[in-house]
Image (tube, grey):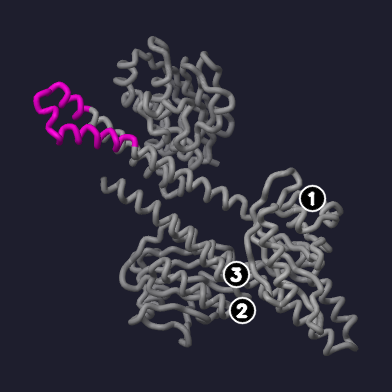
Amino acid sequence: MKDQQHIEQELQSQAVRSHFVSEIALKIRQSLKIQDILKTTVVEIKELLEADRVLIYQIDQNGIGQTVQEAVTEGYILTAGRQLVDQCFQDEYVEKYRQGSMSAIEDINTASIHPCHAEFLRQFQVQANLVVPILLNQWQSQAIQPEVQLWGLLIAHQCDRPRCWSEVEVDLMRQIANQFSIAITQSQLVETLSAQNEALELRVQQRTRRLSESEARFRGAFEHAVSGMAIVNLDGRFLKVNAALRQILGYPEVELLQKTLEAITDFEDWKAANRFLKDLRNNFETGGQFEQRYLHRKGYLVSVVCGLSIVRDNQDMPLYYVLQVQDVTEQRAIEQTKREFVSIVSHELRTPLASIRGSLGLLASGVLSDDPVMTQKMLDISCDQTERLVRLVNDVLDFERLDAHRVLLDRKWHDSSDLIQQAFLSVRSFAEAQQIALSYQPSSIRIWADGDRVIQVLINLISNAIKFSSQNSEVTIGVKEEETCVAIAVSDRGRGIPADQLESIFAPFQQVDASDSRDKDGTGLGLAICRAIVQQHEGCIWVESTLRVGSTFVFTLPKPS
């Protein structure tokens, strides 16, 4: 029960964090002033993570930096305004962060970090820290690829104790750092465009040369920007679009330039966007970010985060809009998958709990005190459902660790026959009870893998084959050595799988028949766990099936280079 409560608390905590990320992103987007963004970011993250210190550390081109904003729990040392000299950081860590690496240290006393860096952290009472880089794409004139600039670091400190940073917390910091990067880029773009307009008025005699250089830089940054970008006239028609935006929307340039913002925006979303455009023109807003759904050329909706600002002349008259678009469709799909996962797990937990509660309720009421046969039946139901709960919780935890790549593989050379024989021993009694024969032609093919995990895959696949086979039939296991991998196949003579479900059955809690989890006593996670294990081995798994004839599940394990 404690494991169950822990899972429910963790799922609720993830939902709260997801909500807070949206809230923080909204607050960041409400201001284009860098200092306002810095202050909002550190205060919100400190409260969300319940950390002792959160700071933003800006780094110059030489790898030297300073704290530009921080939020600290009372009683701990302030880093702002202090001379921060960490030679190990400049020598060993700056380039790693520039490459996009993140650092999550649970305990500086046991972590594999340089002693001088650990001593530097102790000066500020740090026991655990989480560091995420803030990266910007900078384009040089005539450059083909952008230069990634390490603008700074988003850092969380735990000072009162070591701390294990969860995958959700790391992902949360990464999302906020990405939002912060967008906000900086947006602010810099507006500042750049404003500065260009002022410069044109102040330096008329140098206007031609300076304008030419500015246009060249802008064309490079605009056309090759990772985010979608566009210049839009006051009527909402596209004047210029870059390659990234064309890719997001699926339009060729000529066709997109004939479109308007209204034409590509979902009808409901356009109402809010149109109001914002009017507010920009009427000086009620200076710019900001918001989420929209754009219509792809193929007809489906694309979720995007838009950054919108307006450019004015020296008379403060509006000239055109600058639109920046980031595709978040995949991110929203992941969030939807997480919500569905929570819903399914909740349902799977409630079903056995209801049975246990009903059985124990009858026993506790005393109505069965004179009926030992029914009493034993109620106890048997409770035991069976309790075991089902334990299996479900164990499978959920196992799947979560595998899916998050937090399971380290202990790869060694194994004889395939030895692994298959161990799997046979685990399922033999089950096969005999179901009157299913197990068949395997011994071979001495060697595989490079984590033996325990391969046995886990085999047990899952063989158990499934036994469950769905007809009595007095046979389940066969075959091993074949190929040029780059070893393929292992488990075949049954069961009812088969419909063609439209050959892929979906590997998803969590998916069954060919909705009643299988009840009738076949499964959790719906076995094949998902198999896929996660095989993929962590860099292999593949699939199924071939014919209805009313049988199915063959095949997985491959690559040979080491």
Determine the residue positioned at 54% across, 76% down: 38
Q: Is residue 221 above or below residue 258?
A: below
Q: CA distance from mark 1 to mark 3?
A: 28 Å
Quadrant of the image containing the N terminus: top left
Determine the residue positioned at 38% across, 33% down: 523
State which region is magenta.
351-380
Residue 251 numbered tag: 1
- Tell me if 102 is positioned left or right of 195 in this view: left
Residue 33 numbered tag: 2
Which amino acid lies under the numbered mark 3 shown in the image of this protein?
Answer: Arg
Residue 417 rendering spot, x and y as whole percentages: 40, 25
Q: Earlier in the sequence, mark 2 or mark 1?
A: 2
The count of marks equals: 3
Q: Is residue 22 above or below residue 349?
A: below
Residue 206 rendering spot, x and y as whole percentages: 88, 86
- Frontmost residue, 418 versus 223: 223
Determine the residue positioned at 40% across, 51% down: 11
